[in-house]
Image (cartoon, helix red, strand yellow):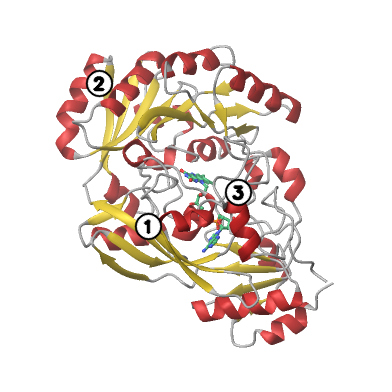
Amino acid sequence: MADIAALAAALDGIELSSDRALLRQKSRDFYWYSPILKKQLDGKSGDLYARPKDEAEVLRILAACRAARVPVTTRGGGTGNYGQCVPLEGGVILDMTAMAKPIAITDGVVDVECGMKMIDLDLWARDQGWELKLWPSTKRTATIGGFVAGGGAGVGGIAHGTMRERGNLVGARVATMQDPPVVLDLEGDDASPVNRTYGTTGIMTRIRLPLTPAQDWRDIAIGFEKFTDASAFALALSFADGIPKKMCGVFDSQLPPFFRGIADSVPAGQSLVLTMVAPSGLRALRDLAREHNGTFLAEQSTVEAERDPDKTPFYEYCWNHTTLQVLKKDRGVSYLQCRFPFEDTLAAVEAVRIPFRDEVWMHTECVRFGGRITMSALPVIRWTSEARIYEIIAAFEAAGLGIANPHVLTIEEGSNYRRVPGDQLGFKQRTDPLGLLNPGKMRDFSPVETAA
Ligand code: FAD
């Protein structure tokens, strides 16, 4: 058992706390969306909270933790939904939110400290004519480090793919758990081992990301009598290269009544498409909607809505916010994360929507992977039991869907491919040989040095 008081003494001068209530609060994320993870993770807690203000303090914390064999679990906004931030073996909670400065934009690439909130970063870039290519629907609370380490898909995916797309992560500065801890400055493919590895391979202190020219995005809500028309419209919009867009989500008719703020605009029984389109594409969007029997229901400026705490930008009904909007009114649901095939996408959506319609409320998001368009799904699911969710997963997989299971703790099991890509495992063996970084989250890792 590590001596936490001695560790705290060794970290004198750094912002620390061992207040139990704070530790409990900072040891949680949104894992409770999954009744399975809730059972496994409720009550887990770190032993010491540390909030470094710069890279030197990060290195001091890592060195002291390595010496004392104390695990370190990093945290940004704490909005992950796989329990990524939950310390399974106690230890130090490393809160990165004090390292939140933008450094510079050079040739369209932003260099930023990892604890910066994505909304602040986007607004700062926007003042210089740029915007983020990608953001999660939690943009108003998530940090950029947490998005790269724990998320990586979302708004912008219809145009730019995911964070895993080569070029979407230019580079990162990464503090390691070697003896002694060092900072690596990684570029391009060399930075991939920190991409969606839940802080198990190193602590990112700074990130470099490509930006895209800022647009005055319009949030548009379009209603459809038939879900199949909504779905066909969304896919057609994804392929319409003449219409600049940032997002397109499709919702079966059970879902819009949960969307406080726009529910009253959606006629009962209608399916809904929520999209973000640049002003230059609005006329073409109307023509496309008419072709698919869609009716414009509501419109607002995305940027104005996100700057106003009382307003809801439409992306806060999309991606995993759909589940949150339903959970606000009905705690008896959970969700899945799925990916449809590239071919016959709409038929694949119907193949799982129709038979499960009483318990699975379909919600899809249009997205590119490797330059090809398809739909991801984050359907809301009436929760009955663990056995039932695995029956649904099996049926979805049999229909050709990839499942990124959100009811599991490890990176591998939560991925479509059930393994970590590239050399992430080998990288961790080099940068964290004792396995002290967020232990238990990379399934295939075993310590290469003994902790004695
Ligand atoms: P945290 O939850 O604090 O951390 C996430 C992981 O990253 C943890 O494993 C943590 O250890 C690690 N980490 C954090 N900072 C660092 C760092 N500096 N160095 C190394 N590791 C670090 N995700 C999406 O991708 N797209 C979405 O659209 C989306 N929508 C969501 C909607 C809701 C309502 C909720 C609850 C979650 C959603 N998520 C989504 C998941 C999550 O919000 C995002 O991935 C978000 O970007 C995480 O950022 P964060 O700062 O909250 O990270």
Q: CA distance from mark 2 to mark 1?
A: 37 Å
Q: Are marks 1 and 3 in contact (CB under 8 Å)?
A: no
Determine the secondary structure under disc 2. helix
**Image location of residue 346, percent across then percent down:** 42, 17
Mark 3 vs 2, N-terminal side: 3
Q: Looking at this view, is 223 or 36 the one in front?
A: 36
Which corner quadrant of the image does residue 202 belong to? Answer: bottom right
Q: Which residue is mark 3?
A: 30
Determine the secondary structure under disc 1. loop
**Image location of residue 20, percent across then percent down:** 73, 69
Query: Could one spot residue 411 in this view of the protein?
Result: yes
**Image location of residue 15, percent across then percent down:** 59, 80
Which corner quadrant of the image does residue 33 belong to? Answer: top right
| Residue type at tag 3 | Phe
Q: Which residue is mark 2?
A: 289
Kindly identify the residue that appears in the image at 14 percent across and 37 percent down: 280
Query: Could one spot residue 53 in this view of the protein?
Result: no
Q: Which residue is mark 1?
A: 170
Determine the secondary structure under disc 3. loop
Mark 1 nearby-residue class (10 Å; few <14, some 14–19, many ≥20) = many
In this view, 35 is above or below 14: above
In this view, 132 is above or below 36: below
Q: CA distance from mark 1 to mark 3?
A: 28 Å
Q: Looking at this view, is 284 or 218 the one in front?
A: 284
Q: Nearer the viewer, mark 1 or mark 3?
A: 1
